[in-house]
Amino acid sequence: MSPEKAQAYWKENISMIIKLLIVWFVFSFGCGILFINELNAIEISGVKLGYWFAQQGAIYVFVILIFVYVKVMTRIDEKYGVNE
Protein backbone atom coordinates (compact mmCIF):
# COMPACT_ATOMS: atom_id res chain seq x y z
CA MET A 1 0.00 0.00 0.00
CA SER A 2 1.34 3.41 -0.93
CA PRO A 3 2.03 5.93 1.84
CA GLU A 4 -0.73 8.22 0.53
CA LYS A 5 -3.24 5.38 0.54
CA ALA A 6 -2.15 4.30 4.02
CA GLN A 7 -2.53 7.84 5.31
CA ALA A 8 -6.03 8.12 3.80
CA TYR A 9 -6.93 4.75 5.35
CA TRP A 10 -5.89 5.81 8.85
CA LYS A 11 -7.49 9.22 8.46
CA GLU A 12 -10.81 7.58 7.61
CA ASN A 13 -10.39 5.05 10.42
CA ILE A 14 -9.64 7.70 13.06
CA SER A 15 -12.48 9.90 11.80
CA MET A 16 -14.93 7.03 12.20
CA ILE A 17 -13.66 6.24 15.70
CA ILE A 18 -14.05 9.87 16.77
CA LYS A 19 -17.63 9.95 15.46
CA LEU A 20 -18.50 6.75 17.33
CA LEU A 21 -16.94 8.09 20.53
CA ILE A 22 -18.99 11.28 20.22
CA VAL A 23 -22.17 9.20 19.91
CA TRP A 24 -21.20 7.16 22.95
CA PHE A 25 -20.36 10.33 24.92
CA VAL A 26 -23.75 11.86 24.10
CA PHE A 27 -25.57 8.75 25.28
CA SER A 28 -23.44 8.02 28.35
CA PHE A 29 -22.65 11.50 29.66
CA GLY A 30 -25.45 13.46 28.02
CA CYS A 31 -28.39 11.14 28.65
CA GLY A 32 -27.03 9.80 31.94
CA ILE A 33 -26.02 13.11 33.52
CA LEU A 34 -26.85 16.27 31.56
CA PHE A 35 -30.36 15.48 30.33
CA ILE A 36 -31.39 13.28 33.25
CA ASN A 37 -34.11 15.62 34.54
CA GLU A 38 -35.81 15.80 31.15
CA LEU A 39 -35.51 12.05 30.62
CA ASN A 40 -36.81 11.25 34.10
CA ALA A 41 -40.15 12.75 33.05
CA ILE A 42 -40.54 9.67 30.82
CA GLU A 43 -41.20 6.32 32.48
CA ILE A 44 -41.06 2.91 30.83
CA SER A 45 -42.42 0.01 32.89
CA GLY A 46 -42.15 2.13 36.02
CA VAL A 47 -38.48 2.98 35.47
CA LYS A 48 -37.43 6.55 34.80
CA LEU A 49 -35.66 6.84 31.45
CA GLY A 50 -32.81 8.96 32.85
CA TYR A 51 -32.03 6.32 35.46
CA TRP A 52 -32.17 3.60 32.80
CA PHE A 53 -29.68 5.45 30.56
CA ALA A 54 -27.34 6.06 33.48
CA GLN A 55 -27.44 2.40 34.56
CA GLN A 56 -27.85 0.38 31.37
CA GLY A 57 -28.55 2.45 28.29
CA ALA A 58 -24.97 3.61 27.80
CA ILE A 59 -23.76 0.01 27.95
CA TYR A 60 -26.29 -1.08 25.31
CA VAL A 61 -25.29 1.83 23.09
CA PHE A 62 -21.63 0.85 23.50
CA VAL A 63 -22.33 -2.75 22.44
CA ILE A 64 -24.32 -1.52 19.41
CA LEU A 65 -21.44 0.80 18.49
CA ILE A 66 -19.06 -2.17 18.54
CA PHE A 67 -21.15 -3.87 15.86
CA VAL A 68 -21.37 -0.62 13.88
CA TYR A 69 -17.58 -0.27 14.10
CA VAL A 70 -17.07 -3.81 12.78
CA LYS A 71 -19.44 -3.25 9.86
CA VAL A 72 -18.01 0.14 8.87
CA MET A 73 -14.41 -1.00 9.38
CA THR A 74 -15.03 -3.97 7.10
CA ARG A 75 -16.19 -1.58 4.37
CA ILE A 76 -13.15 0.67 4.88
CA ASP A 77 -10.81 -2.36 4.75
CA GLU A 78 -12.40 -3.53 1.50
CA LYS A 79 -12.19 -0.02 0.06
CA TYR A 80 -8.43 0.13 0.68
CA GLY A 81 -7.76 -3.53 -0.08
CA VAL A 82 -6.55 -4.55 3.37
CA ASN A 83 -9.37 -6.95 4.20
CA GLU A 84 -8.61 -10.53 5.17
Image (cartoon, rainbow, N blue to C red):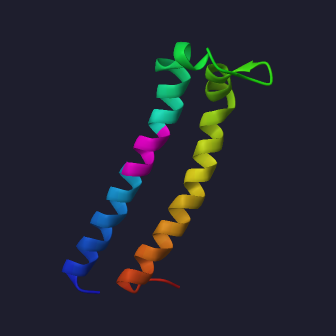
Side of 41 where 35 appears, left or right: left
Image quarter of residue 76: bottom left
Q: Residue furthest right?
A: 45
Work out whether 55 lies above or below 25.
Answer: above
Q: 7 and 28: which one is in front?
A: 28
Q: Where is residue 39 shown, x and y percent of the image?
A: 57, 20
Above or below for 39 versus 75: above
In this rendering, the answer to whether 38 lies above or below 79 is above
User: Which quadrant would the N terminus be assigned to in this image?
Assistant: bottom left
User: Is residue 46 shown left or right of residue 70?
Assistant: right
Which segment is the magenta one?
A: 19-24
Residue at screen point 49% across, 41% down:
24
Q: Residue at x 25, y 72 (%)?
A: 8
Question: Please, is residue 21 above or below residue 32 in the view?
Answer: below
Please name the residue shown 55% across and 52% down the image. Answer: 65
The percent position of residue 36, horizontal first and vertical second, equals 55, 17
Q: Give residue 30's position: percent from left, percent from top.
A: 47, 27
Q: Main secondary structure of the magenta part?
A: helix
Looking at the image, how many numbered discs can be counted on the residues?
A: 0
Residue 42 lies within the magenta run: no
Please state if 33 lies on the left or on the right of 10 as rendered.
right
Which image quadrant is residue 79 in? bottom left
* Residue at 19% over, 79% down: 4
User: Residue 16 occupies which quadrant of the picture?
Assistant: bottom left
